[in-house]
Structure formats: structure tokens, C-alpha cells
Image (tube, helix red, strand yellow):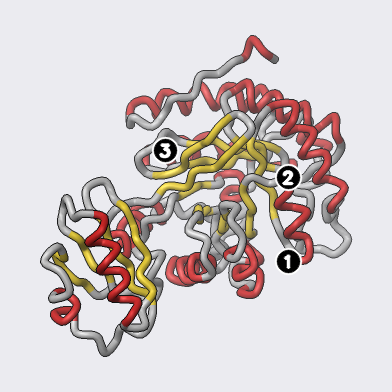
Amino acid sequence: MIVVMKVGSPEPEVARVCEELKGWGLSPEKIVGRHKVVLGLVGETVALDPLQIQEISPWIEEVLRVEKPYKRASREYRHGEPSEVIVNTPAGPVPVGEHHAIAVVAGPCSVENEEMIVETAKRVKAAGAHFLRGGAFKPRTSPYAFQGHGESALSLLQAAKDATGLGIITELMDAADLDALAEVADVIQVGARNMQNFSLLKKVGAQDKPVLLKRGMSATIEEWLMAAEYILAAGNPNVILCERGIRTFDSKYARNTLDLAAIPVLRTLTHLPIMIDPSHGTGKWEYVPAMAKAAIAAGTDSLMIEVHPNPAKALSDGPQSLTPDRFDLLMQELAVIGKVVGRWDIQPAMATV
């Protein structure tokens, strides 16, 4: 249930309404929009009469029930207002959201060694990326495949961060590693295989670093949003949804099926920012540029693109990784579409390479 306050509602009156609602056993969450303040009511609201709440204050414009099973993630919860996630990086805050320029994440699937990760970070930074992605802990289908260097790789990510000022996005697989990972990561990634690891979702929801939640490979959109609800319900409002391709019946020509239709669907259902990962979504670098450009045209807020200095020798996901030179070219192509839709303000700094 949400309470919509009238435009210009005085802050003392908003505070008074919150206090009265707390007396009813509810937990009001204040959401400040562009023009109005909305109070999200958390608690047992089924038996409440909206008209009774309306009588609390003449400054209440309307009281609405949120019909979706995912309450906080619902766009209704913010009365149609999109949310934004502000990520604090060494180079300054980077906003991710519907009303901001597209944020670009780039880097290798796995952190292999210091020279490789620092070199890649410098190249993607020069091309205009805001964040470096790189796995310290890697979930793999085969127990014999490279699983990442683990905690030792976090220091390598820190070295790349120090060298470039890029924000760091890396995946958390085990809650036991959360504290160490959060020391380095600016955004904590929950991968596709852990999308419904509910105990892990509660853990990342109880800390304040932004969370990137990847869609499970066989998850419906509603299941994905319910997973986000776990993080939001635990207290962390900073969630970014990442579409990374889903498993369908045809895997001969592409690793997954990138569901770009999820972008307009999510826009109607949730206020949360949206990221698209065309690298995992296709599994082949040749298809990444087309899907990245299509994602911008469809309205994504962010892109995640795998880049490796030598994909042929990558320890994981080489076939879907762009070389730095190909990434440079792609960023120039993305700028054309990004500027047309008013979502691009990246200024490449190739002279610094």
C-alpha cells in the first residue's frame, strides 16, 4: 500500500503522518519523487481501509494498494517514479537509472593476473567505461573448469582500481566472502546461478553496497523481481537488474537467448535500473555489438561487455570477449545511437593509453 502526499506537503506534516502510521503497526518508507512524496507502507495492510488512512491528513492525495506480489520492486511502489542507483567510485559518483546517461561496464570474465587486469582496466577506461568487471570467484558448470583465483584476486582488482579510478563490479558466491569482497567492490554482483539463493540475497540486502542482480538462466521476469524483492526487503534499496540471456531450445548458434523484450516489460513493472549483458546473452563476440546497440535503442540504462586482451588464451569465456581494439570501435558505434536517444555523455580519452 502507498500513500501519495500532495505537491508541496510540508515536511512536518509528512513526518506527523509517518508517526501516526507507525502507531498502527506499519513501517512507512518515504520516497521522494520529482514532484511528490510517497509513503510506502510495509506491514499488515490487507485489512486496512484506504479511506481511513486518507482521513489522517488533508495533505494526503490518495491511498493505493500495490497489487503485485513484489511490493518494493513494483513501479507502483514509487507511484511510477523510476529509481536511481548512485555508485561511489574513486573517480566520483556514477548514477545508473532511467534519467541518466548509459553506464558502461567492461572487463574480463575472470581476473587472471595483475598485468592482464590492469592493462584491460586502462584500455576500457580510456574508451569511456565507468566500471571494471572481473570475477575473483567464478561459478562454473564443470568442477574442473577454472574457478577464479578467489580472495587473492581481490587485491588484483584493487590494483586495477587504484590505477584507473574505475568502479569495481565482481561476483559474490558465498556469504562468507562478503566482507572481503565488499572492501574492494563498489557493486556486488549476484550471478544467474545464485538468483534464487535466498539466504545470499538476504545477506547482500543487509549491507549497503549496491547490488547487481543477474537474471537466472531459466527464470521468469516475475521470479527475477521476487528475487530483487528479497534484497529490497532486507533494507538495501540499491538494486540493478541485469538481463544476461535465458536458456531456450536453440543453443547451436548462440549460448543463450538475450531477452531484449525484458527492457520495455520491466519499465512497466518496476522502478529499478536495467542493465544488459550481451556477452553472456549471445556467447559469441561477433554478436555482441549488434545486441549492445539494440539494447540502447530499446532503453537500457547500462551495458556490461566482456573485454580481454587476448581472448584466445582467456581462462574463461574467451569466445564472447571483445579485444580492447574491438571494444574501442564498439564504443564509437554505441555513441552514435546513445546520442540520438539522449543517453550518452562518454568522452573517450584514447590519448591517455
| Residue 163 picture location, percent across and down | 75, 26
Q: Nearer the viewer, residue 219 or 24?
A: 24
Q: Residue at x 17, y 74 (%)?
A: 56
| Residue 270 picture location, percent across and down | 37, 60
Rendering quarter of residue 247: bottom right
Considering only vertical position in the picture, is 324 above or below 203?
Answer: above
Q: Nearer the viewer, residue 132 or 107?
A: 132
Considering only vertical position in the picture, is 249 above or below 353?
Answer: below
Q: Residue placed farthest to the bottom in the image?
A: 47
Left or right side of 25 for 232: right
Q: Amino acid at mark 1?
A: Ala
Q: Is residue 269 visible?
A: no
Indicate which disc residue 175 carries. 1
Considering only vertical position in the picture, is 272 above or below 223?
Answer: above
Q: Amino acid at mark 2?
A: Val
**Label 3 or label 2, whichever comes before in sequence order:** 2
**Label 2 or label 1, whichever comes before in sequence order:** 1
Q: Which residue is mark 2?
A: 184
Q: Amino acid at mark 3?
A: Ile
Q: Say few, some or many: other residues with alpha carbon within 10 Å of mark 1 (under 14 / 14 to 19 / 20 or more).
A: some
Q: SS at mark 1?
A: helix
| Residue 88 picture location, percent across and down | 57, 40
Q: Which residue is mark 3?
A: 296
Which mark is nearer the camera, 3 or 1? 1
